[in-house]
Every structure is written in C-alpha cells, then in structure tokens.
Image (cartoon, coloured by chain):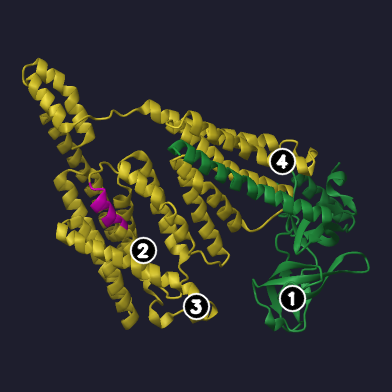
Chain colours: A green, B yellow
Amino acid sequence: MNKRNSILLGLGVVIAAQLAVPAWMIIRHESTLREGKVFKFRTQPVDPADAFRGRYVLLRLEPGVVKVTNARQWHYNQKAFAVLGVDSNGFAIVESLERDAPAGKTALPIHVNWTEEKNGQVHIDWTGLDRFYMTEKKAPAAEEAYREHNRITNRSCHVTVRVRGGRAVIENLFIEDRPIRDWLK
Amino acid sequence: MNKKAIQWLYGELPRLVAQGILTPDAEARLRTHYGPVEPARPARLAVIIFGVLGALLIGAGIILVLAHNWEDLSRPVRAVLSILPLAAAQGLAVWTILKRPQSLAWREGSGTLLFLMIGSSISLIAQTYNISGDLPGFLLTWSLLGLPVVYLLNAVVPALLYIWGITEWSCHLRFEDGFAAGYWPLAALLLPLIAIWLRSGRYQVRPTLLLWALCVSVTVAAGVTIERVLPGLWIMLYAGLFALMFLAGEFWFADAEGFWNRPLRHFGAAGVMVLAFMLTFEWPWREIGWHYWYWERIHDVSWRAIPDAVLGSLIPISATVLLVMSVRRKTPLGLLFGLAPILAVVSYALVSLTETYAPAAGIFDLYLLVIGIWLLVTGIRIGKQGQMNAGLLAITALIVARFFDSDLDFLLRGLIFIALGIAFLVANIVMLRRKGASHEQA
C-alpha cells in the first residue's frame, strides 16, 4: 500500500470515529426522549437577573433538598442516585438517595452539594439538567416575560424530563402549563 | 552562517565580479561553499495564512447560518444538520489528500476546518438535546477526535488547537477538583510529530510554532496537574522546568537566529527571570516545606500525589543533568540559567529547616542581580540589544521591588528612578550608535 492510500485508510477510520460520536449522542438522547418515562419537575430560574444567559435558560430543578436519615454519610461533590417518585400534584419527588444505581427503580444521577446534619437534609444538584437552549433573541425575551408575569401572579414553571435507564433529557420548559415557545408568541 | 548574511553576500557577488574584485571562479566557489539559500516566499505564507483564516470564517459562518431559524426545524432535522458541516469538512480533507497532498495551504486550511467542525457538531447536538455540564469531557472528546487530523494532514494549526484543547481540559478538570495529570500522556501524543518535524528541519516555521505553544501549555499544565500535597513544590518544579527549557534550547537549537526562532531558550530564560523575581519576595516562602504536608489530601486519595513526586523530581533532575553537560561545554549562560533548580532546592531546604524566609529571598535577590549584570555586560560586549535590555530590565525590576519594600524617602526613590531611566536611554543610544558605526564601516 502506498503512502497516500494508507493516509486515506487512516482518514477513513478517523472519519468514522468522528461521525460516530455525534451520531451516538443523537441515538442515545432520541431513544431517551422517545421511550423514556415522563417526569414533571418544578423549576425556577436561579436568579431572574442572571437566569437567561444569552442562548439558554439556566434552570434549578426542584426538589433541591432531600430528607435523609443520616446526613453524615454524604459529602460535597459525591455522586449519588436520586430515586424518583411522583407527588399528588403530579410533580417529581425524591423518595431516597442511594450510593449505587438501584435495580428496578427509576433513579437519576445527582451530585451532593452540601449537607445539614442537624436537619438531616442533603442539598443536591441535578447533574446535567440545568440548561434549556433557545435562540439568542428568544432567551432574553423569555427572561423578561417570566419576570413580568411572575411579578403579577406567582406563576409556576416546570420542565418535562424523559428518564430511561438512568439517563435524563429535558423535553420542554413550561410556564403555567404552556410550552415556553407558545407562551412567548 | 546567518541566512540573511548569505543572501546579502549572494546579492553582492555579481557586482564584485563585474568590478574585478572577485573572479567568476571565486564566485562559483563561494556559492558552492555556502550552498543554496532558499529565498523567503511571503506569497506562499500569505496563501497559508489566508487559507486558515478562510477555513475559520467558513466554519463560523456555517454555524451562524444553521443557528438562524434553528427553532423552526424539527429536532431530528436539527440533529442531522449538526453533523453536516462535519461531514463537509471531512470531505474537504479527503479531497485535499487526493488532489492537493503537497499544498500546505490546503492541508492547514482543511485540517483547521475539520478540527473546528468536530467541536461545533458536538456542541450543536448538545444544544439540541439540552445537554449541559461536563465541559472537560467535551474538551477531551473534541481534542482526541481532532488529534489524528494533525498527523494525517501533517498540519500545525490543528496541532495548536489540540494543545489548546488539552490545556483547557486540564485547567477545567483541576477547577472541578479532578485529576488532571492525564495532560502529560495526552501531550506526549504529539511527540512523534515533533520528532518527525525536527528531523526534517528544526528551524522551520511549523516546529517553531509548535514549540512556542508547548512552552506555554506545559507551563500552565505544570501548575494545574500537581496536587499540592507538599506546599511550595511549585518553586522547585518551575525552576527545573524553565531551566530545562533554556538548556534544551541552548543545546539543540543553538544555530537559530532571532527571538522568535528560539522558543525554548527565550521562554525558558524569561521563565527563570520572572520566577527568580517572584522568589525575591518573602511570600512564596511562607508556610512551605515538609512541616506543612497537606495531610488531609493525602488521606483522601494518596495515589493522586504520584504526579507530584514524579514531576517534582524528574524535571529538576533532568535540568541538572543538562546543567552538568553545559559545564562540560563551557556555556556561561547555560550555567547561569541552569543554576535555578539547584538554588530553588537549596533555598527550599533552608526554609523548611530553619523556617526563616529572608535567606532564601536573599539568595534569589543575588541570583537575579547576577543574571541581570551578566546579560547587560555580555549584551553590550557582543552587541545584542535585546540581551542588554533584558539585563537592564532584571536589574531595574529588582531595584524597584526592593525600594517598595524599604522605607526610603520619596526624593531618594525618585532620583533612583531617574537614574535607571537614564541608564536605559544611554545604553540603548550607545548601542544604536555603535551598530550604526559598524554598519557604515562595512
């Protein structure tokens, strides 16, 4: 094989790998969105002034605090699994925190933020579920609209998240049960 | 001999022959003696630069066009569109190898575009599916997928992007309290490329660019990849690193001319001088040494301290080996700059044992002063203005810093500043005059 052909062969392998990574991302997230179980998470922008940073809406999913029996066994930046349940209003709750992915239950990976040993509370970060992308023009408009309406009536905000096999993908962002993009029109 | 000087000589030869000063035979022998000189080809360089710039603009343009009306498209369409620019860049790379394998402009341009499109397609898909977080993971994936492009297209801009990628990765990982020592094997993946390029011509533009980028990158990485279990380890590590750079430049790249063509030598020298200046203060010496082991960290994950031990010993030891070699070769500058790690280790031990800071700071006061005077004097003697000014700068920095430490009155400080300013001006004017005079004599 001459030099050019071996370079071409190498490039072929590299091209396949380069395409495989985005293709795998698409397949994985599409399958979660199509086949995953839907959970509604109450959410709020972290800080109305800072929540819509240009191209995405920065979210803080609830619950952000979990009651545990022994808060001492958790520490900052620890990876854990939040076993999901649903409350009487249909919103997601955390039933328990586990060190390893529990079998037969729907759970999502989270990171421990800080703990309050006295109250038996663990503050958590929903890993990778803090952004909802919009175009540059719409994200600031969404911020303005949310702030305005939140001032008049205390409107609620939630996201739908599809969960499958320990993976979660944000499906949509809602204000007062209307998708944000419809709500902005 | 200087390439420019040979070019000048070749320009003069026809006139000298015409005036009968040289015989045509002597001219021919001179030309054989000095060999052919490849003329600088600014046009070719311009094509390469504009090729790369063009690739960057096209890449950015494609992303902007896609972003327009993005939300009106369905999710799967958006996902497929995210991959399209990557596929197009890959097609261009294949075309380059098939049709323009010799063209540096095409190789650099298409390689740059391909490298950028890998990152853009991954991040566009991340946007489509609202994937956030894990910036280090993204940077690592991007860099590793882009690395083969460097080798297959034999291009330097993708190599620079790779260096940026792994450096950025190690910094973010460190920031998130991760284990960033993976930087070193990742950087080592460029070693075959460097070896190939250096063998085919170590003073060419591309290996030089790569070395400059690596100097910066390694300097950043040395700081972020150590775990800081032994407070103050950075002093010995950086002293060793900069001395190593300088000595390597002095040994293996001695024939290069000009500031930019000697990255290792000049980056290393600047590093030693800046570090020595920092070490003339007392703050770096406070609370360091083996009495201040960061036990908490070592109990947490003790294996993470391994890179500290490896880097902290390997780099200063390698620098010392080169220093011994420079003693044999009798290169005074090598001896001077190569002394930095030894002084750092001695001072470190001194501070650890005695818990007093002044002697260590004093050692580096003296060291920087000697460097400054040496550079100043030798710079004047061999007519190198840059070297002379570097020496003056070192002395000035030292004097200014010590005056701010002391309680001297403003009048005295003012007079000293004026004297320093005059010294700068006079030295430079004298140097310029001398150069002018030697030019006229020639």
| Chain letter of the residue beneath label 2 in the structure image | B
Residue lying at 53% horizontally and 52% vertically, measured from the top left = B144
Q: Which residue is mark 1?
A: A98
Rendered image: mark on residue B302:
3
Residue B339 visible in the current orientation: no
Q: Which residue is depicted at the point 34% across and 67% down?
A: B314
User: Which tag, 2 or 3, sits closer to the chain's start?
Assistant: 2
- Secondary structure of residue under mark 2: helix
Q: Secondary structure at mark 4?
A: helix
Q: Nearer the viewer, mark 1 or mark 4?
A: 4
Examine the structure image and report whether residue A8 is included in the region drawn in magenta: no
- Badge 2 is on which residue? B238
> Is label 3 in a helix, a strand or a loop?
helix
Q: Main secondary structure of the magenta part?
A: helix
Mark nearest the camera among 1 and 2 is: 1
**Residue B127 on image: x %, y %:** 70, 48
Which quarter of the image is occupied by the C terminus of chain B?
top left
Quadrant into which the N terminus of chain B falls: top left
Q: Is residue B193 visible?
A: yes
Where B286 sits versus B92, above or below? below
Q: Are marks 1 and 2 in contact (CB under 8 Å)?
A: no
Q: Quadrant of residue B84?
A: top right
Labels 3 and 1 share a subunit:
no
In the rendered image, residues at marks 1 and 4 fall on the same chain: no
Q: Which residues are magenta?
A: B245-254
Badge 4: residue crowd in 10 Å (few <14, some 14–19, many ≥20) = some
Identify the amino acid type marked 3.
Ser
Q: Circle 4 is placed at which residue position?
A: B80
- Amino acid type, mark 1: Glu
How far is the residue under mark 1 from the one under mark 4?
Answer: 37 Å
